[in-house]
Image (spheres, grey):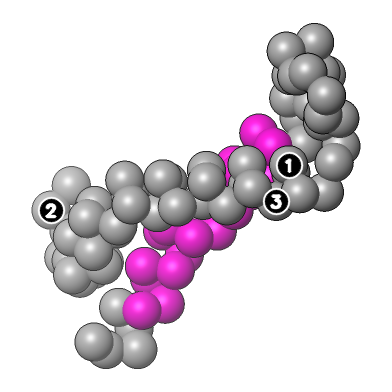
Amino acid sequence: MKLRDYIIRRLILLIPVLIGVSLITFGLTRLVRSMLYGLQPTDPATLILAALLLLVIAIAAGYGPARRASRIDPIQALRHE
């Protein structure tokens, strides 16, 4: 794998996924508070587990498209449009 491909995949996949996971995990604590029994939504173990689960699902869903997008030369993509 080329370094350029790795960097592009990282930009395409990881940065938006991490932002989205953190917003979802911390943003929905008030909504989830009424649905939990015996747990606090700000419990560190619960937050970490939820964030890791969302992170794994998002990376699994986005890896294929990110890999295809990283193989396209940006100059050729701009010229095509």
Seen at 18% across and 47% down, the residue is 81
Q: Please identify the residue farthest to the front as the structure is shown.
A: 38
Location of residue 46 by image quarter: top right
Q: Which residues are magenta?
A: 6-25
Location of residue 79 by image quarter: bottom left
Q: Dot 3: what SS?
A: helix
Q: Which residue is mark 2?
A: 80
> Disc 2 residue type?
His
> Where residue 49 appears, x then y in whole percent?
64, 48
Q: Nearer the viewer, mark 2 or mark 3?
A: 3
> Where residue 62 appears, x then y in whole percent?
33, 50
> Disc 1 residue type?
Thr
> Disc 3 residue type?
Ile
Q: Nearer the viewer, residue 18 or 55?
A: 55
In the rendered structure, the answer to whether residue 34 lies left or right of residue 59 reads right
Query: Looking at the image, how many numbered discs can be counted on the residues?
Result: 3
Q: Earlier in the sequence, mark 2 or mark 1?
A: 1
Q: Are marks 1 and 3 in contact (CB under 8 Å)?
A: yes
Which numbered disc covers residue 46?
1
Seen at 69% across and 45% down, the residue is 22
In the rendered structure, the answer to whether residue 52 lies left or right of residue 29 reads left
Q: CA distance from mark 2 to mark 3?
A: 43 Å
Q: Dot 2: what SS?
A: helix
> Where residue 34 appears, x then y in whole percent?
80, 10
